[in-house]
Amino acid sequence: MGIKVRRVVVFALVLIMAALFEGSRAVTLCNMTEDGLQECKPSVTQPNPADPPSPGCCQALQGADLTCLCSYRNSFLLPSLGIDPDLAMALPSKCNLATPANC
């Protein structure tokens, strides 16, 4: 199984676990908690994304592994969850954070 496929599978499992344990906020992805991910969701979903991102979203992104998050840019899962990858990739600059190279 290729590395890209493994990442997609791991990401899918994280999302499934997050859905199963919604009462628990212990799930993290790329150093972002589920709460942090949820805080950013309004800024990355169509048709009316929140702009600018909330202060809570920007705070969550400050501690995130942006290179790790960038690795999900071409994932088929993002659109299936209503997440616009282009909006997601624009979040760091909207929060005055440096975007990783090649992202």
Image: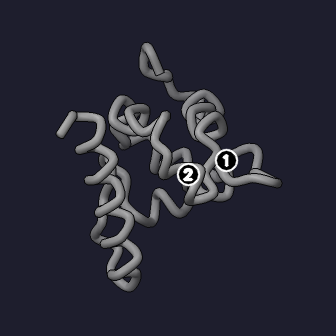
- Which residue lies most toward the left here? 1
Classify mark 2: residues with Cα within 10 Å, few (<14), some (14-19) or many (20+): many
| 1 horizontally vs 13: left or right | left
Describe the element under mark 1 as helix, strand or loop.
loop
Instruction: Say which amino acid is labelled 1.
Output: Pro
Mark 1 vs 2: CB contact within 8 A:
yes
Residue 47 in which image quadrant: bottom right
Percent x, y for residue 60?
A: 45, 50
Q: Secondary structure at mark 2?
A: helix
Residue on which the image places disc 1: 53
Q: Position of residue 14 (x, y in %)?
A: 31, 62
Viewer-nearest residue: 92 or 20: 20
Q: Which mark is residue 16?
A: none
Residue plotted at (44% across, 15% down): 102
Give the residue displayed 66% in from the left and 39% down from the top.
Answer: 87
Q: Which residue is mark 2?
A: 57
Q: Give the x, y percent position of residue 15.
A: 38, 64
Q: Residues within 10 Å of mark 1 (few under 14, many from 20)?
A: some
Residue visible at 30% across and 58% down? 28
Query: Is 74 situated above or below 58?
Result: above
Q: Amino acid at mark 2?
A: Cys
Of 86 and 79, the residue lying toward us: 79
CA separation in Å, label 1 and label 2: 6 Å
What's the coloring here? one colour
Q: Vertical placement of 23 versus 18: above or below?
A: below
Left or right: residue 4 compared with residue 66: left
Up-down relation of residue 86 to residue 58 (above or below): above
